[in-house]
Amino acid sequence: MRQKTSNPESDAPENLGREEKAKAGGSQTLQRGLDLLDQVIDGPIKLADLSERMGLTRSTTHRLANAMVERGFLTFLPREGYQLGPKLLQLGFLAQSQADVVQIARPHLEALAAASEDVVHLGRLDGDQALYLDKIPGRRRVEISSRIGDRHPLTSTGLGKALLIDDAEANWRRLFDADQATGTHQQDYDGWLERMRAYAAAGRAFDLEENEDQIRCVAAPIRDASGAIIAAISLSSAAQYMDDDRMAALSKDVRAAAHKVSADLGWTPGVKSPRRPARR
């Protein structure tokens, strides 16, 4: 009997075609699953409404939604419909625990420092002080005394003021009085408060030679997925390079860098946490 032989070259196009179709189908299913999650973000949704929003038949939507329920990405509530499931809570917690703000922020800090040629800092709240977590040197011959690990007053540094933008004014007053008592740059509270209100409205803060002579900076807060401020970026340089016009122009760049870091941490533009209550 003559043995049947196969030609790999002749079979390859057909096999390749099947593989490509399978990949395309899998990609489409994944995309539909992600689209479905977007549709239930605002709360429970019934099958009929979900099907209409997805532009799919009810049977297709039902199969897709049930598959998501089985994996824990969705939960089905009788008489209410589908909503986000416990698997997403688990993944969100793991993602947040694995997020290293220094590592995530570093490429954005480097890009900002390269574009501006100035020093860029990253810091977070540490009790009633600003803790400096990272520093990218600038290209200008400007000496700035800050070091990674340093702690500075909140009310006299741009970075510190950016960290306080969401705080209640009662907390601003408490921190201001405490900093003034420890010998921080002496200034009038009413004038400082007026500037802080403007900073909060603008989403960024300035240091007008308050923390270090002849050094000015622009700073903006970094937010997490909840909208809470967890860190801040500041760009600093000698006052001769930081007149009012340049500080205004840099405000957009510093805010943009902070927004990029925030987005990498899960923040969505427009999401802002409630003001933190005054600490005692």
Image (cartoon, rainbow, N blue to C red):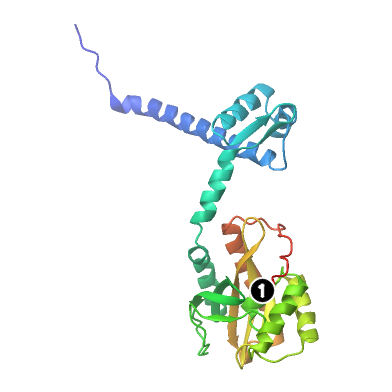
> Which quadrant of the view contains residue 58?
top right
SS state under label 1: helix
Q: Nearer the viewer, residue 27 or 50?
A: 50
Q: From where the camera sits, is residue 12 visible?
A: yes
Q: Quadrant of the N terminus?
A: top left
What's the residue at 38%, 27% (across, down)?
15
Residue at 51 percent across and 50 percent down: it is 94
Query: Which of the 4 image quarters holds residue 84?
Result: top right
- Give how far across and how far down residue 59 sits, in percent: 65, 21
- In the figure, 59 relative to 246: above or below? above
| Residue 253 visible, this orientation | no
Report the front residue among 77 and 127.
127
Location of the C terminus (image quadrant): bottom right
Label 1 belongs to which residue?
A: 162
Q: In which quadrant of the rendered view does residue 167 lie?
A: bottom right
Q: Nearer the viewer, residue 131 or 2?
A: 131
- Where 45 falls versus 103 (above or below)? above
184 is higher (above) or lower (below) than 91? below
Q: Residue 154, position in %: x, y?
A: 64, 79
Expressed as whole percent of the image width and height from the top left, the position of residue 102 reads 50, 67
Query: Is 266 left or right of 51, judged from the image as shown?
Result: left
Residue, far left: 1
x, y percentage for residue 265? 57, 58
User: Farthest top residue?
Assistant: 1
Q: How many marks?
A: 1
Crowd tier of the residue under label 1, counting other residues whose Cα lies within 10 Å: few below 14, some 14–19, many 20 or above: many
Q: Amino acid at mark 1?
A: Ala
> Residue at 59% across / 73% down in the picture?
127
